[in-house]
Image (cartoon, rainbow, N blue to C red):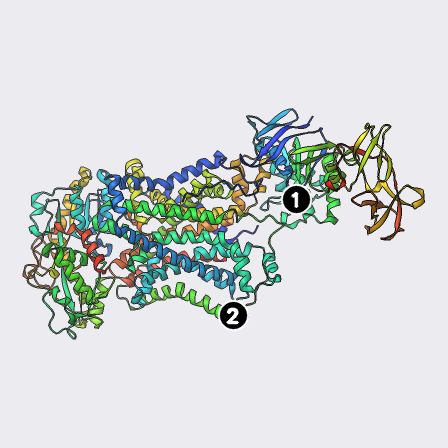
Amino acid sequence: MRRSSVRRLAVPVIALGLLAPALAACSDEPADLVIYSGRNEDLVEPLLEKLEKELDANVEVRYGDSAELAAQILEEGDKTEAGLFFSQDAGALGALSKEGALTALPQPTLDKVEEAYRGGEGDWVGVSGRVRVLAYNPGKVPTPPDSVHQLTEPEWKGKIGFAPNNASFQAFVTGMRVLEGDDAAREWLKGFKANSPKTYESNTDILEAVDSGEVSAGLINHYYWYEKAAEEGEDKLTAKLHFLPGGDPGGLVNVAGVGLLKGADTKQADYAQQAADYLLGEEAQTYFAEETKEYPLAAGVAPADGLPALDSLEAPRINLGELDSLKETLAMLQEAGLV
Amino acid sequence: MGVSIGKDPGARPVPWLRPPGRVPWALALPAALAAAFALLPLVYLCVRALEQGPGHAWDIVTTERAAQLLGHSIALAAVVVTACLVLGISLAWLTTRTNLPWARGWAVLVTLPLAVPSYVAAFAWLSAVPELSGFTGSALSLTLVSFPYVHLPVAAALRRTDPAQEETARSLGLGTLRTFWRVTLPQLRPAAAGGAVLVALYVLSDFGAVSLMRYDTFTRGIYTSYRASFDRTPAAALSVVLVLLTVALVAAEARTRGRAGYARTGTGTARPADPTSLGKWRAPALGWCAAVSAAAVAFPLATLGYWLAVGNSATWDPARLTETATSTLGVAAAGAALTTVLALPIGVIAARHRGRTAHLLEQAAYAGHALPGITIALSLVFFAVRYAHPLYQELPLLVGAYAVLFLPVAVAATRAAVLQAPPVLEDVARSLGRGPWRVLREITVPLAAPGVAAGAALTFVVCMKELPATLLLRPTGMDTLATRLWTETGTASYAAAAPYAAALILLAAIPSYLLGRHRT
Amino acid sequence: MTELRIEGLTKSYGPQAPRVLDGLDLTVPAGALAAVLGPSGCGKTTLLRIVAGFLRADAGSVTVAERVLSAPGVHLPPERRRIGTVPQEGALFPHLSVARNVAFGLTGVDRTERRRRTDEMLELVGLSGYGARMPHELSGGQQQRIALARALAPRPALVLLDEPFNALDSALRAGVRADVRTALRLSGATAVLVTHDQQEALSTADVVAVVREGRVAQCDTPEQVYRRPADPWVAGFVGDAVLLPATARAGGTAETALGVVPLAEEAGAGRGTVLLRPEQLELTEQASTSAHGTVTDVRFYGHDAMVTVTVEGLAEPVDIRAAGPVAVKPGERTGIRVNGEAVLHRPAVTDHAVK
């Protein structure tokens, strides 16, 4: 029997493999605070490193998908490893709140942000805001529409880009349902679908398409445009943003936020509390404004240059805690044949 | 379902087959432990699915939507399996039995798609041809990453089968094609069926490709259920359906396998077949190999190159890449090792014993394979925080998750390898004073070693690519190439993602390459 | 010393399946080489596997040297039986060298002893100096001899050989057979050889047990089995047989179509069948005998020839083995003379019931 090359490789690999966990298991020092972050590592890692310095504690961050991390937290129950949940959107925080996995935040912390941007039970708080906008190509659309409802008109056939799988788009639809009722939302989706909008995988892709004129307009979050402008230069961008006025559902302001986990031990809880306050403090809020081009929600920090002020936006008034009825939204999207 | 196993009244007794149900404890005990481990997710699913009463769970799985998703999944699995059979068998035959130029090179090349994660393949196709989105794109990308599951065992079987039978068929007046159809193909059935089951389970559990391609399958429904409703009950109830589907598939496969696939009993080894001359089919055959290799290997790599070239997010960090690659290799090696060790007793029993015990053990190993990674991960979260808290979010748990996820891959390889080792050798060793355990160690394992090692290499590759369970169970702060790739594509930083994707594919290509060269 | 005793062994594969072994009894004296001879499907391989401990019997017992190995409620695992096996085609461990194959069963002895015994065994089978080779570097006959050396090395109480010469071509077979016989004799081990080849059984074994449908039809020396078969079936199975309807008479003779033949044993009067071997018949001048027939076929084998003759009053023709030159041609008339003694079986069977 000839010894094959696979076997020659496999034996040391297997030996190594069986040893590796044993070696790795003894290299840990306990963390003072574990953060489960549904926000992308590339976006928030520098901020969380600053946070670690500020707290003078050993902070460990576990990155993942917000919804999956929420499921993990629910599964862990009161034995959770995490002290703080940093969510990409309000929906996951609302779900944890509903299951009683979050602990109430002290009033001074809550009071740092406007009531609209925090959980109804006082157990989570938004730390940065993102606005749904219409990106448009001025070469194709000289005057952008003021409402998403206009996008169902025939003149827009085949000219709009959207990302049906994107959580922000789905939150926008949920917002429409909350604001205008399920029937209106269903009607809009039907009309939207009838206009054969082009689907993209991400907001970035939509923006590229708008910029190149592949589509005339697209539904995205505001910061994609500002990030691209910062990277490539504003003058190089053809695409422009239109903030939808008059409380149009297309102008929804959603937040990324944090909640303190009930299952955390007291030491972690203390650090988690400090971390939440830090994220609402000036340094962190400035970071959101400058680095992620999101809207700061506290500490009086102004948004990045070029962004209209948050209170000038005429965004729809909505309780973000209600955005957790994503299930019905998805059913509706499926029904309309959009996902 | 409902197949009765272990009784085959019509067949002549084969004296060396162990009587049903009598599996030595030295094998049965570790096999039972491994099977119990593999069944952990099922326990969890039942706990969660029945949390709000069986009626509620029943309502969830009997909705029209669930039926529709199931239909989609089954249709996708059927198409991908069929396509994989066509690709896998045709390429295996061309590379082992014909005078195809550069046959060995092609054999290696068509194994490499194993190294390509389904989400990378789907992404590549989607960005090139957006119209593919949906069923077509899902079927295409899943076929192109999973056909080696059929190709590898079929190529091995082709090298093993006795060419004398084909020659006899030729002399009886059958042409090349009809000989292949009537003589060669039936002999390949066990090997192809084993591969087809792995492909089907892979398709059923895949999330990456179908979510990018926006095709609604059962697994996507399960993910959506976690993501949209934050409710674990419907996800669990739906997952139970997947488990049942898996059990049915495995039972069906066991049926096609029948009693075939035993060790050669003739003298010596089979004489290598004289290659069939392709004649005027030479150019089309070459074109076929080239087209498949281009679509399955060159195209995803070219896409990565494109990302690197046009992207503006490139943050070249060789130190981090090296560190990530090293930890990926380590954890994948550990996963492959544990999986192989757990698979060994089950694979041996599946090869050497008939009867209910043997069959149940094998089924248990497969039960979790169609489950989405997130379900397996959450089930291990559930058990670890309750009963093994010190292990939670430590490497051993992640490695354990790999074992649960990929046990069937290693079991299939082990079973095939053990089947090739003549059982009479084990009898002789017993009569020379060795107990069953030592016979396993000194005879069965060394003889099956090349095949078992091939299974380990395959497991190693799939562990490297694994994402959902890795995300949830990795030690906090640890990255694998797959999780980095996920992070970078999450912010659409494709140029930054490209080095990780390239490293993943290239590193996974090494064991894939060895698998392609491996002669069973 | 190492007597093998098998009593009432019964085995079937499944509750509804027919019995493969049906109350088989067999005793092999210590140091003897016994052949278990039977057609395929008679249960001989099953018998071997039960003795070796690979299978459990449904009933009956196996005793070696007064040690009960299998009995109701007793089943010693194969590794504790001290029974060596030599399977078909040798079944050498392909991943071990010849020396390590031979030494495989030598556990619990120190290295020098192991090497000494390995060399001794290699010498016994005439393959000294082959220790470093790998099994696939040996010829089929050499592999078979190594398999025997491996089985004998741990000084087993009993050696079982399962059609060990089947895979060898006929030119090699006789030589290997003789070598194995010599080696077994020198080792003093009791051995059981399973075969379906009559010649092999008769020429190699000290004792031949003919098995039919899960029972021993006859167990005796090769000579006795051949010359005094227990019944017409055994007679036909162990060699060419001429079976003639006969009427026995007092005084130890029987009247047949070939005349009156002497019987080996006084059988009393009555009808029956007598057995003769073709070499007991002789072609003669028509005038010198009362038995006549017509030659229908002559087949030449080198060392002898077989002549088929139809005889008046017999439904089937008889075969006659002619040692010297054959003077007759098909179509010619010939006389037939019977030499030696015949065996009478009762009850009578017609000659075409056999074959």
* Residue furthest to the right: C287
> Residue C92: x and y, percent?
62, 44
Q: Residue at x 21, y 73 (%)?
A: A213
What type is the residue that disc 2 sits on?
A: Arg
Question: Are the two marked residues, 1 and 2, in contact with CB atoms closer than 8 angstroms?
Answer: no
Q: Nearer the viewer, residue A131 or C190?
A: C190
* Residue furthest to the front: C313
Q: Residue at x 85, y 53 (%)?
A: C331
Instruction: Judge left or right: residue A14 versus residue C139.
Output: left
What type is the residue that disc 1 sits on?
A: Gly
Q: Nearer the viewer, residue B476 or C283?
A: C283
Q: Nearer the viewer, residue B425 or B316?
A: B425
Residue A12 can be seen in this image: no
Residue at which label 1 appears: C131
Chain on which label 2 sits: B
Badge nearest the viewer, 1 or 2: 2
> Residue C188: x and y, percent?
72, 32
Vertical placement of residue A258 versus B439, above or below: below
Vertical placement of residue C212 versus A13, above or below: above
Residue C231 can be seen in this image: yes
Chain on which label 1 sits: C
Residue at which label 2 appears: B282
Q: Nearer the viewer, residue B292 or C331?
A: C331
Instruction: Judge left or right: residue B475 versus residue C126.
Output: left
Category of crowding for the residue at label 1, using alpha-carbon neighbours closer than 10 angstroms: few (below 14), some (14–19), many (at least 20): some
Q: Quadrant of residue B442?
A: top right
